[in-house]
Image (tube, rainbow, N blue to C red):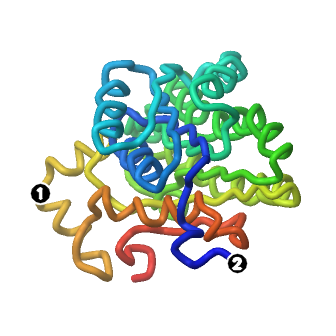
């Protein structure tokens, strides 16, 4: 039987991370690489991916870039095929691509609604479905979704974003129910407030940021490193018996 620490290692595993050019996706990609996985980085813009790749390789890890837009449903099959070329079939997929238009409920446009649900709810399902065939053949796989505080609570100007993230929690359960008998677990992380491009407007308001920190049990907002251990756990053999769950990493925000 492997020792406890051995079960957190991802040697010989291949991970695809969407939204890997910055923020949460990049932090998780770096963590998976440090745990031993070969990581395929995906986002729309190539330049940030190359920066992330250089950082991972500079630390002794393995990474490759596959630019792509997960909001284009018809291209997800080709994206899945491209992702398997650098290191082989995908064992782990992390759906971290996201966007938030922050429109008032009375001003939500058709285009903004469709784009947010397509990227954050539709893409995790259809891209995963393109990848689970290879995972079934191996009898092992990991799907990690990114939920949100807005999966559970309503925030101002977050109607479409919250609807997408609420759906992620239930989608996670359904994917787990369907695919876990094949050795493929599906879980989600629900981050609190972290410094990313999506939360930049919040971080410019120091008074609001302080109020949010005071709403946590710990008394501070998150740092991207706070997500990395949870991500490695949920993507590793250490979590073999955990599936269909959404784990808040929010400093106790939802506990108060």
Which image quarter: residue 9?
bottom right
Asked where in the image residue 21 lies, by quadrant, the reply is: top left
Q: Which residue is mark 2?
A: 1
Return the x and y of residue 156 as percentages of the image width and height.
38, 51
Instruction: Look at discs 1 and 2 and give the one toward the viewer.
Output: 2
Left or right: 163 with respect to 200? right
Which image quadrant: the N terminus?
bottom right
Dot 2: what SS?
loop
Instruction: Pick whichever, 256 or 222, lies toward us.
Output: 222
Q: Position of residue 85 (x, y in %)?
A: 63, 23
Q: Name which residue lies at 36% across and 48% down.
A: 27
Q: Residue at x 60, y 54 (%)?
A: 166
Q: Report x, y in % for residue 250.
A: 39, 69
**Is 252 or 223 nearer to us in this picture?**
223
Tag 1 residue: 206
58 up-or-down from 51: above or below: below
Kindly identify which numbered label has been placed on residue 104. none
143 relative to 50 in the view: left or right: right
Contact (CB < 8 A) between labels 1 and 2? no
Between the C-alphas of marks 1 and 2, the distance is 50 Å
């Amino acid at each position: 039987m492997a020792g406890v620490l051995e079960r957190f290692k991802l040697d010989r595993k291949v991970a695809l991370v969407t939204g890997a050019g910055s923020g949460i996706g990049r932090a998780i990609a770096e963590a998976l690489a440090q745990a031993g996985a070969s990581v395929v980085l995906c986002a729309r813009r190539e330049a940030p991916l190359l920066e992330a790749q250089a950082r991972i390789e500079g630390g002794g890890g393995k990474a490759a870039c596959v630019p792509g837009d997960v909001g284009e449903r018809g291209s997800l099959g080709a994206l899945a095929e491209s992702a398997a070329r650098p290191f082989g079939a995908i064992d782990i997929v992390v759906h971290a691509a996201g966007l938030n238009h922050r429109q008032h409920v009375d001003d939500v446009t058709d285009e903004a609604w469709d784009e947010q649900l397509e990227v954050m709810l539709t893409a995790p399902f259809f891209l995963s479905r393109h990848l689970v065939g290879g995972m079934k053949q191996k009898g092992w796989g990991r799907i990690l979704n990114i939920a949100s505080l807005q999966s559970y609570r309503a925030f101002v100007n977050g109607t479409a974003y919250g609807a997408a993230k609420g759906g992620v929690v239930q989608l996670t359960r359904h994917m787990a129910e369907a695919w876990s008998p094949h050795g493929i677990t599906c879980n989600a992380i629900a981050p609190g407030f972290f410094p990313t491009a999506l939360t930049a407007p919040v971080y410019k308001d120091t008074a609001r940021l302080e109020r949010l920190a005071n709403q946590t049990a710990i008394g501070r907002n998150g740092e991207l490193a706070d997500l990395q251990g949870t991500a490695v756990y949920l993507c590793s053999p250490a979590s073999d018996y955990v599936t269909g769950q959404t784990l808040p990493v929010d400093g106790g925000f939802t506990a108060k």
